[in-house]
Image: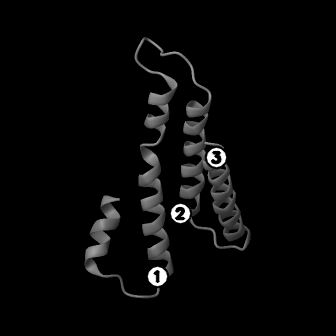
């Protein structure tokens, strides 16, 4: 578990450093908020996993709230990847099928 936490911290620091570097360099775009949001939500969920407490109302314990916090993280990452893809190919004509995927995500 300690090794997993170490890798999570390292990955978070790398993504946050990249995001800040992009922002400071003047490449300000709305998609830069998505990885920061995913990391913050992930770490909030990790706090519930690390600091366990007895169930609230005999239903919601820390582990179940951890899983609740992990629901939006894949959606945020997928949205970030799609937005960055469209940002990178903004000078290239977009295929018609990708706009439908972008609207779904």
Find residue 3 and name its label.
none
Question: Which corner quadrant holds the C terminus?
Answer: bottom left
Tell which tag, 1 or 3, sits nearer the viewer: 3
Numbered marks: total: 3
Q: Position of residue 48 (x, y in %)?
A: 57, 31
Q: Is residue 83 above or below residue 9?
A: below
Q: Is residue 46 left or right of residue 92?
A: right
Q: Is residue 48 above or below residue 53?
A: below
Q: Foreground: 73 or 99?
A: 73
Q: Is residue 4 above or below residue 79?
A: above
Q: Quadrant of residue 96?
A: bottom left
In this view, the residue farthest toward the top is 57
Residue plotted at (55% across, 44% down): 42
Q: Is residue 4 left or right of residue 58?
A: right
Q: Is residue 18 left or right of residue 102?
A: right
Q: Mark 2 falls on what kind of element?
A: helix
Q: Foreground: 45 or 29?
A: 45
Q: Residues within 10 Å of mark 3 (few under 14, many from 20)?
A: few
Residue plotted at (27% across, 68% down): 100
Find residue 5 and name its label.
3
Going from N to C along the chain, the mark reached first, 1 or 3, is 3
Going from N to C along the chain, the mark reached first, 1 or 2, is 2
Label 3 to label 2, Cα distance in Å? 26 Å
Marks 3,2: beta carbons within 8 A: no
Marks 1,2: beta carbons within 8 A: no
Find residue 31 and name its label.
2
Check disc 1 and report the residue beneath it: 90
Label 1 to label 2, Cα distance in Å? 14 Å
Question: Which corner quadrant holds the N terminus?
Answer: top right
């Amino acid at each position: 578990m300690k090794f997993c936490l170490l890798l999570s911290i390292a990955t978070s620091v790398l993504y946050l450093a990249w995001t800040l570097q992009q922002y400071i360099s003047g490449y300000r775009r709305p998609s830069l908020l998505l990885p920061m949001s995913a990391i913050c939500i992930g770490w909030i969920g990790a706090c519930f996993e690390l600091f366990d407490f007895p169930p609230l109302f005999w239903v919601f314990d820390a582990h179940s709230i951890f899983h609740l916090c992990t629901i939006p993280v894949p959606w945020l990452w997928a949205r970030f990847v799609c937005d960055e893809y469209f940002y990178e190919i903004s000078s290239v004509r977009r295929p018609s099928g990708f706009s439908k995927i972008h609207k779904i995500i």
